Amino acid sequence: MNWDITVNRNGFSLLEVMVALTIMSVVLLALGGLMFQVAQQSRSSAATTYRTAAVQKVAAHMRSLPWDSIDGASGCTADSSGLMGYNRCISVTTAGAKTKQITVVISPTGLFTALPETLLVVRFKSRPVSPF
């Protein structure tokens, strides 16, 4: 007796489908975790960029103030740079007859949070220019 059994395989078995779905779910979970880490790093990078822009803005403002107006800049105010809101606290100390130190602390608030940044600007009183 010759038993010739031919099997017609025109599809996938349930076991093959389950293995494929398991492999695909493991890969998707790994990609999901990676996307979460990328989103966190992107948000942190954006906060650092906005904080740096705020520091540069304040530094330029402190350098442009006339010598007699520097003492009036002391105090804390709320400000923003792009999408980041922050508190800016300025203190002025006189280091000498012709030297002032300006300390600025930028503390981000709101959506983008980052560590506070401290900026120290030293200003010197310019000598009067002789007309001769």
Image (tube, rainbow, N blue to C red):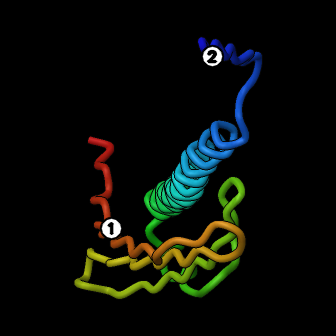
Q: Which residue is mark 2?
A: 3
**Residue 3 percent across, percent down from the top left:** 63, 16
Q: Amino acid at mark 2?
A: Trp
Residue in the foreground of this view, choosing between 14 and 26: 14
Q: Of tags 2 and 1, which is closer to the observer?
A: 2
- Residue at the extreme front: 1
Q: Image check: 48 left or right of 39?
A: left
Q: Residue at x 69, y 53 (%)?
A: 82
Q: Secondary structure at mark 2?
A: loop
Spot occupied by residue 130 in the image (x, y as percentages of width and height): 29, 49
Residue 67 x, y percent position in the rendering = 44, 68
Q: Earlier in the sequence, mark 2 or mark 1?
A: 2
The reply to whether residue 42 is visible in this rendering is no
* Tag shown at residue 123: 1
Give the Cα separation between the discs numbered 2 and 1: 101 Å
In this rendered view, identify the residue nearer to me: 34 or 16.
Answer: 16
The quadrant of the rendering that contains the N terminus is top right
14 left or right of 45? right
Q: Residues within 10 Å of mark 2 (few under 14, many from 20)?
A: few
- Residue in view at x 29 percent, y 66 percent: 124
Between 46 and 36, the residue placed more toward the observer is 36
Q: Considering only vertical position in the picture, is 50 above or below 98?
A: above
Q: Which amino acid, mark 1?
A: Arg
Q: Quadrant of the C terminus?
A: top left
The number of numbered badges drawn on the structure is 2
Residue in front for this viewpoint, 50 or 103: 50
Whole-percent x, y for residue 9 in the image:
72, 18
**SS at circle 1:** strand
Is residue 38 depicted above or below 10 in this figure?
below
Q: Residues within 10 Å of mark 1 (few under 14, many from 20)?
A: some
Residue at point 64% right, 66% down? 112
- Give the number of the disc on residue 12: none
